[in-house]
Image: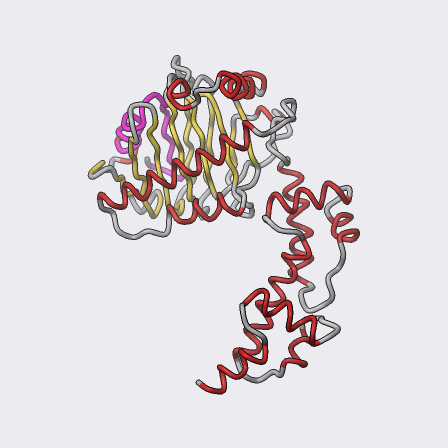
Amino acid sequence: MKGTEFQVNFSYTDIFGYAHVLAKHLNASFNNNEILYPKEVAIGYSRFFKINEFIGYQIAHYKAMKRMVFNRFPSDEKHITVSFQNFTFAKCDKHQYDCNEIISNNNSLGSIQCKSTTQPEIVVIEPGIEVNVIVVLLKENWLENILHDSVSKDKFFNYLVHQNANLRKEFLSPYQNKVFNEVFSGNGFTLLQNLYYDGRVLNLLETFLKDILTKEDAENPFLFASYEDIHMLQKAEQFINDNLLKPFPGVELLSRISCMSRTKFINLFQKVYGQSSFEYSQKKRLAIAYDYMKGGRHSVMDTAQIIGYSGVNNFALAFKKEFGLLPSELLERIKEN
């Protein structure tokens, strides 16, 4: 553990087995299902749980203080890992989509990776990166006890086999992101907290299985989008946020910024953000309007003009739909208080 890099070599065959290996490399204790990282390596923790004999998982929440390298060797058992994380995978020009080296990148919408433990993997976390990750270890025979439909089983394994046991989703859906964040929002660490974790981890696993089993394009190693697609989509999102006090820029312009066709942009934005680009822009603008009026220094008409609405009536209707009251009613409440 000396020097500027921390490295751990391991095989993923059992969730608690990995916990003991990690604790040994860190020269740290593994008590009450938790490892606290030495502050010279990282600030934070890893927690380990088993739901049943088929499913175990790790929750890691930390900020790396030195370069951390996790080198996973291939195992003989055909277990599966499903990782939900707040970082994504940098494109590797050498290996393309089959790259086993993961570089953390916090400027992301999160990501999910499903991989067989028969395949090696190297995860590199650079100093300063804040990591939130949930790694679910599914034992080799778990599928027989989870999916009772032979068609679903075949489809799932088809992805793992034909995609070199490396299936990725380059963003967390709005619902997945909500559940993911709930895992890291709790402070207490009790039996009830364990049940809290179990429920949300199983919920995330269920949503990812649905992503796989409802996907039609078996040739694409990504679910719905590539890393490049998401990166370009973020440029359109940034453009919207930079121009919130102006009229909505329009789908045509946003699709050109994203270097996508109009149809692809509309569909992908809806899948990633759970709403259209216009709805996304309107919600952001209305939130600004709410803050302006909450300060009690702007009239309804002034606020409508500031956020780019051409008419007060349209602004009032949109405001009520979003917040459940008219702008004038908000001002009245502010005056009463």
Instruction: Indicate the quadrant where residue 193 lies.
Output: top left
Q: What stretch of residues is rendered in magenta?
A: 2-23
Residue 277, position in %: x, y? 67, 53
Name the residue located 64 percent from the left edge and 49 percent from the top edge.
234
Q: Is residue 219 magenta?
A: no
Considering the image in quadrants, where does the C terminus appear?
Answer: bottom left
Q: Is residue 4 magenta?
A: yes
Report the front residue among 13 and 331.
Answer: 331
The reply, left or right, for residue 307 in relation to residue 322 is: right
The reply, left or right, for residue 194 in relation to residue 9 is: left
Residue 324, position in %: x, y? 54, 68
Residue 236, position in %: x, y? 69, 52
Considering the image in quadrants, where does the N terminus appear?
Answer: top left
Above or below residue 313? Residue 216 is above
Above or below residue 293? Residue 183 is above
Instruction: Indicate the quadrant where residue 284 lies.
Output: bottom right
Q: Residue furthest top?
A: 76
Name the residue located 46 percent from the left edge and 46 percent from the top edge.
129
Report the front residue among 317 and 126.
Answer: 317
Instruction: Indicate the quadrant where residue 142 lies.
Output: top left
Q: How many marks?
A: 0
Residue 314, position in %: x, y? 70, 70
The reply, left or right, for residue 155 in relation to residue 67 is: right
Name the residue located 50 percent from the left edge and 46 percent from the top edge.
175
